[in-house]
């Protein structure tokens, strides 16, 4: 796909590099067990809450809001998203790199950063790609996980 000039203004591009306020998350054995049951995990280490399953932190950075605060499309408002000229959003993929298991008692700090915004021409028209990086560390600064997430606007 070729680059489509014109949709992304300098004001939109200035959002690249912005980060959310870091969020602190205390991991409990009960939270791990609840997640393991809800996602039908089979391994005892997950079901006993000794270690969190791989997708345990999926969307942990999302703000908790009342249903009235959701956008018309049902998504949570995103303070790291500039006003884009294209409004329909699709998932564009997630890549997680785990540096160590998540255990009960961990106190994690999650920081999400808008790392890139670019545009391409798709088969049915222009697309805007928004890329976020999420860094998860312990309070002591030990790296636990890194995530790259893409959203596609059309």
Image (spheres, rainbow, N blue to C red):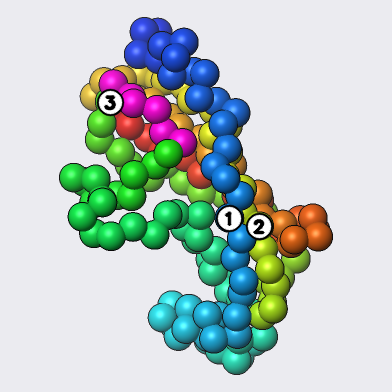
Quick one: SS at disc 1? strand
The numbered mark, 3 or 1, whose residue comes first in the sequence reads 1
59 to 19, vertically: above or below: below
In this view, 12 is above or below 148 = above
Left or right of residue 32: residue 144? right
User: Residue 10: percent from the left, percent from the top?
Assistant: 46, 10
Q: Name the residue under label 1.
A: 23
Q: Nearer the viewer, residue 141 or 143?
A: 141
Identify the secondary structure beneath mark 2.
Answer: strand
Quadrant assignment for the N terminus:
top left
Mark 3 or mark 2, which has the lower sequence index?
A: 3
Whole-percent x, y for residue 109 in the image: 66, 57
Q: Are marks 2 and 1 in contact (CB under 8 Å)?
A: yes
Q: Residue at x 34, y 26 (%)?
A: 83
Residue segment shown in magenta: 80-85
C-alpha span from label 3 to label 1: 29 Å
Please provide percent x and percent y for residue 50. 67, 85
Confirm whether residue 96 shows in the render. Answer: no
Per the image, the residue denoted by label 3 is 86
Q: Do callouts 3 and 1 mark residues in contact (Cβ within 8 Å)?
A: no
Q: Is residue 82 magenta?
A: yes
Residue indicated by mark 2: 109
Q: Is 57 situated above or below 16?
A: below
| Label 3: which secondary element | loop
Query: Which of pointers 3 and 2 indicates the residue nearer the eye?
Result: 2
- Which quarter of the rendered picture does the C terminus lie within? top left
Q: Is residue 6 above or below residue 28?
A: above
User: Residue at image x 57%, y 37%?
Assistant: 19
Q: Does the magenta segment cover residue 42?
A: no
Residue at 61%, 74% (x, y): give it.
Answer: 27
The residues tagged by marks 2 and 1 sit, at their Cα atoms, a distance apart of 5 Å
Residue 120 placement: quadrant = top left
């Amino acid at each position: 796909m070729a680059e489509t000039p014109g949709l992304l203004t300098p004001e939109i591009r200035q959002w690249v590099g912005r980060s959310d306020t870091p969020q602190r998350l205390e991991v409990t054995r009960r939270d791990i067990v609840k997640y393991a049951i809800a996602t039908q995990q089979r391994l005892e280490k997950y079901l006993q809450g000794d270690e969190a399953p791989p997708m345990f932190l999926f969307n942990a950075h999302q703000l908790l809001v009342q249903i009235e605060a959701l956008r018309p499309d049902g998504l949570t408002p995103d303070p790291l998203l500039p006003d884009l000229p294209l409004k329909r959003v699709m998932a564009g993929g997630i890549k997680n790199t785990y540096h160590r298991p998540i255990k009960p008692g961990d106190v994690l700090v999650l920081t999400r950063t808008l790392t890139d915004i670019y545009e391409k021409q798709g088969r049915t028209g222009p697309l805007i790609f928004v890329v976020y990086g999420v860094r998860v560390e312990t309070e002591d600064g030990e790296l636990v996980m890194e995530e790259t997430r893409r959203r596609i606007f059309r």
